[in-house]
Amino acid sequence: MKFAVITDIHGNATALKAVLKKISEEKNVSEIFCLGDLIGIGPQTNEVIELVRSTPRMTTISGNHDENVLALLHDQPYPDSYRHAKAHHQWVADQLTPENQHFLEQLPRTIKKTFSGEDVLFTHYAYRDESKAIGEEPLAATVDGTEETLPGLFKGQQASLICFGHHHPKQLVRTKGVTYLNPGALGCQPEAIAPFALVEQTEGGWQIDVMEVMYDDQPYLEAFHAAAMPEKELLRKLFLGGRT
């Protein structure tokens, strides 16, 4: 069993295309798991969702940016911790087609799969309370992913492999019989590099390769320049390394 894990595309269809092409060239990849935050930050909102929708054997869950946008569209409470991003999320909401909105509305928050007796959890991040709406701040606070912090963050989860995103740096930690994998944010790195992971189940456990794809970011940056997004220059500085 071999599968790919991607997360935090953040409105960057240019990077997503490069990663999907690379995955298609790999042998025996049976499925792709996308761990949420398809949208927000980048301008290619509908392009990203349409790529995800049209990619065979891709299983997708929701992220907090996806749910923040939906909260605005549904006139539901918006999380106070993201009040600084509300105008940006409203701009994203205004771009979203009805078909792509419907797709986001159907996404689960977590998926658990069993491969040859080994349980795997796919989640955007750890939840304090998965039953709470996004406006009630259901996600746990982000922590640096270490052998000390991750077991506590995901306490109570019965899985030998936990795949997550949300926190943009790459993280691969093995401790106490559990492997924790965050392949890193695909769509918002300081350079034109898009990370993802390949996971293979072997007799010796989970074999994981965290890979990077270099891509031509000009189409993305041109779309970024052209978009009338609120706080655009701040987003460029914080999430794109100031790339122009």
Image (cartoon, rainbow, N blue to C red):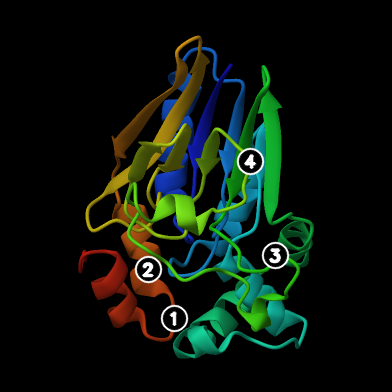
Q: Secondary structure at mark 3?
A: loop
Earlier-in-chain disc, 3 versus 1: 3
Frontmost of labels 2 and 4 is 4
Q: Quadrant location of residue 38?
A: bottom right
1 to 93, vertically: above or below: above
Amino acid under disc 4: Gln
What residue would you read off at disc 4?
158
Residue 231 in the image, given as x and y percentages of width and height: 37, 85
What residue would you read off at disc 2?
224
Q: Secondary structure at mark 4?
A: loop
Residues tagged 1 and 2 counted as in contact (Cβ below 8 A): yes
Earlier-in-chain disc, 4 versus 3: 3
Q: Quadrant location of residue 220?
A: bottom left
Judging depth in this view, the residue of 86 and 127 nearest the camera is 127
Query: Between marks 4 and 3, how big is the CA–CA gap?
Result: 16 Å
Q: Which mark is residue 130?
A: 3
Amino acid under disc 2: Phe
Seen from this angle, which residue lies furthest front?
176
Q: Residue at x 49, y 82 (%)?
A: 88
Q: Secondary structure at mark 2?
A: helix
Q: Is residue 104 visible?
A: yes
Amino acid under disc 1: Met
Q: Residue at x 44, y 41 (%)?
A: 180
Query: Between marks 2 and 4, how big is the CA–CA gap?
Result: 41 Å
Q: Secondary structure at mark 1?
A: loop
Crowd around label 3: few <14 · some 14–19 · many ≥20 (10 Å): few
What residue would you read off at disc 1?
229
Seen from this angle, which residue lies furthest top?
203
